[in-house]
Amino acid sequence: MTTAREGEPFDEHTGLPASELRAIRQRTTWYDLAHECLDQRWDRTPGNTRRTLADAFATITPALVHPGATYPRPRVLRRALYSWAFNKNARDREPIDEWRKALDAMCRPVLLYGPFHRLSSPTQTADDARAIVESGELWGLTPKWGGNATAQAHRGPIPTNAKPGSLEFYTTVKPKPQGSTPPGYASWEADVEAGVRSFTKDGDDWASIPIIITEAR
């Protein structure tokens, strides 16, 4: 696919022009994005929630670093992430040497997929959209046609006439191939797509993916 006027190719997975995708690969890391997300919430978040966020980021960050960075001492890496990287107050001082070495493995570029969007609807109210923005995650239940819990969204940027409660986002988790979903839709199924978190809440099975909000209404 190419840009109509300039003849520039698009990446079919992300929908981004090739030049923009190259720039993102060169400058963006999941580690940086997670820092930004946490810092935006830190000052207005109570202590217990801070610990929950730090634990969540420390858990998913090693799995989302592209192209799959590993560290031979995972406990040291987790402690470095939880106690220093995702603790805004602790970052006032330098990390100890073994933590620094572990964190170096996290500073690698990450591929973003998107844009995608969710539209306001009876099943996604303005309150639901605010919860998504606050959590930095997109959740989904088991679809009516069966299978595992699945997070779903529309492909492409948010429409200009989208109502309050709609939002646009990117994610580090690759969606199902376009041929396996309805036209214009994207989905991320638990236990199928790598990077999808699955959990149970109030007796329901859920799927969750980390997202970076680019517009919320």
Image: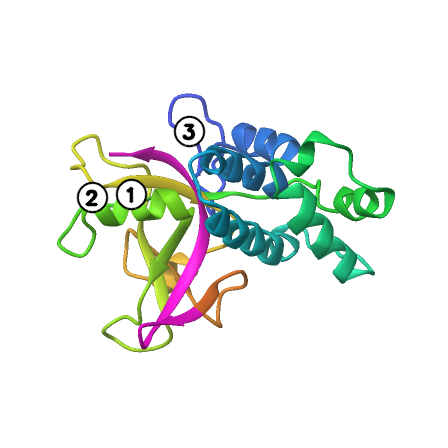
Q: Residue 198's x, y, as percent?
A: 45, 69
Q: Which residue is mark 3?
A: 3
- Residue type at mark 3 is Thr
- Residue type at mark 1 is Arg
Q: Nearer the viewer, mark 2 or mark 3?
A: 2
Does dot 2 land on a helix, a strand or a loop? Answer: helix
Q: Residue 151's x, y, as percent?
A: 36, 60
Where, by quadrant of the figure, is residue 216 drawn?
top left
Identify the disc placed on residue 130. Answer: 1
Q: Is residue 4 above or below residue 1?
A: above
What range of the chain is rendered magenta? 199-217
Query: Which numbered disc flags the more N-terminal residue, 3 or 1?
Result: 3
Between residue 17 and residue 107, name the one nearer to us. 107
Toward the top, the furthest residue is: 6
Toward the left, the furthest residue is: 122
Q: Which residue is mark 2?
A: 126
Between residue 45 and residue 131, name the one nearer to us. 45
